């Protein structure tokens, strides 16, 4: 919780285990590697006052303050985080309202099963998943329609994506397409995957 309250150096130490799934410890006489395959879930406020982008309350922060606040999260660290979601505050009427147009748990489970089956077929039983694909496998398995290709090209320039960030989007889009049982990644799949890069978009907005 409160990810940006940690020192930047502390956050940067996460980069190696997130990438390599192991922690490397070096001392004067010995060097050891420990397995560290983990799921990182982190939360932070959008700005120092907490209200930037809020629909009900005004943010009191200057743009430079927000930029400095978010700069603790380096590009290389964010590139290693697959999904970045902006969560709006909830209205009381929303809490009391009857949900409409929501997928049932049964439908959600079926979609997850579709993705699991597609990845088992793709990679066999070697305990590998879309998230583990090398750049060569991304090129092989993340085939895009023409419209999806045009969208990711615009996003690459607009968000100043690194190759790692670009491949993250393609891996997520591949999983979304697997849920929908599609061989090709189409425009809605790539658009949804780009939406899951909200911190990249916030940083780019405040750099301008």
Image (tube, grey):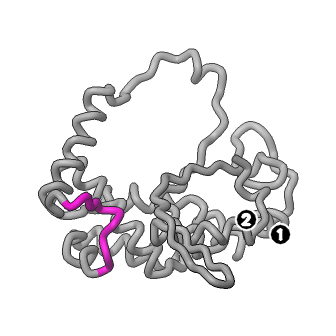
The residue tagged with tag 2: helix, strand or loop?
helix
Residue 30, disc: none
Q: Residue at x 46, y 66 (%)?
A: 21
Residue 154, image quadrant: bottom left
Task: Classify 136 as above or below 110.
Answer: below
Q: Is residue 186 left or right of residue 13?
A: left
Count of all numbered marks drawn on residues in the image? 2
| Other-residue count near label 1 (Cα within 10 Å), few / some / many at <14 / 14–19 / ≥20 | few
Residue 76, image quadrant: bottom right
Front-most of residues 49 and 167:
167
Which label's residue is closer to the chain start, 2 or 1?
A: 1
Residue 77 locus on image (x, y percent) = 59, 70
- Is residue 128 covered in magenta? yes
The residue identified by callout 1 is 64
| Other-residue count near label 2 (Cα within 10 Å), few / some / many at <14 / 14–19 / ≥20 | many
Front-most of residues 125 and 164:
125
Residue 70, disc: 2
Q: Residue at x 60, y 43 (%)?
A: 87
Q: Is residue 169 left or right of residue 97?
A: left
The residue tagged with tag 1: helix, strand or loop?
helix
Residue 126 locus on image (x, y percent) = 20, 61
Can residue 45 be seen in the rendering of this structure? no
Boundaries of the magenta span: 126-135
Secondary structure mostly seen in the magenta stretch: loop
Q: CA distance from mark 2 to mark 1?
A: 10 Å
Front-most of residues 5 and 154:
5
Front-most of residues 39 and 77:
39
- Is residue 171 covered in magenta? no
Can residue 52 be seen in the rendering of this structure? yes
Task: Classify 37 as above or below 88.
Answer: below
């Amino acid at each position: 919780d409160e990810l940006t309250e940690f020192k930047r150096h502390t956050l940067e130490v996460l980069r190696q285990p997130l990438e390599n799934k192991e922690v490397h410890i070096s001392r004067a006489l010995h060097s050891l590697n420990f397995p560290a395959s983990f799921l990182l879930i982190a939360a932070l406020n959008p700005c120092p006052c907490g209200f930037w982008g809020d629909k009900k309350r005004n943010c009191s922060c200057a743009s430079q303050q927000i930029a400095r606040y978010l700069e603790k999260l380096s590009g290389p660290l964010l590139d290693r985080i697959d999904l970045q979601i902006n969560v709006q505050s909830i209205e009381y009427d929303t809490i009391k309202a009857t949900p409409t147009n929501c997928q049932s748990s049964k439908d959600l489970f079926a979609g997850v099963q579709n993705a699991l089956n597609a990845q088992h077929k793709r990679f066999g039983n070697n305990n590998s998943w879309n998230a583990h694909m090398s750049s060569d496998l991304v090129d092989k398995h993340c085939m895009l329609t023409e419209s999806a290709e045009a969208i990711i090209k615009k996003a690459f320039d607009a968000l100043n994506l690194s190759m790692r960030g670009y491949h993250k989007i393609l891996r997520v889009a591949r999983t979304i397409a697997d849920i929908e049982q599609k061989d090709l990644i189409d425009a809605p799949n790539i658009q949804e995957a780009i939406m899951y890069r909200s911190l990249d978009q916030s940083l780019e907005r405040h750099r301008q």
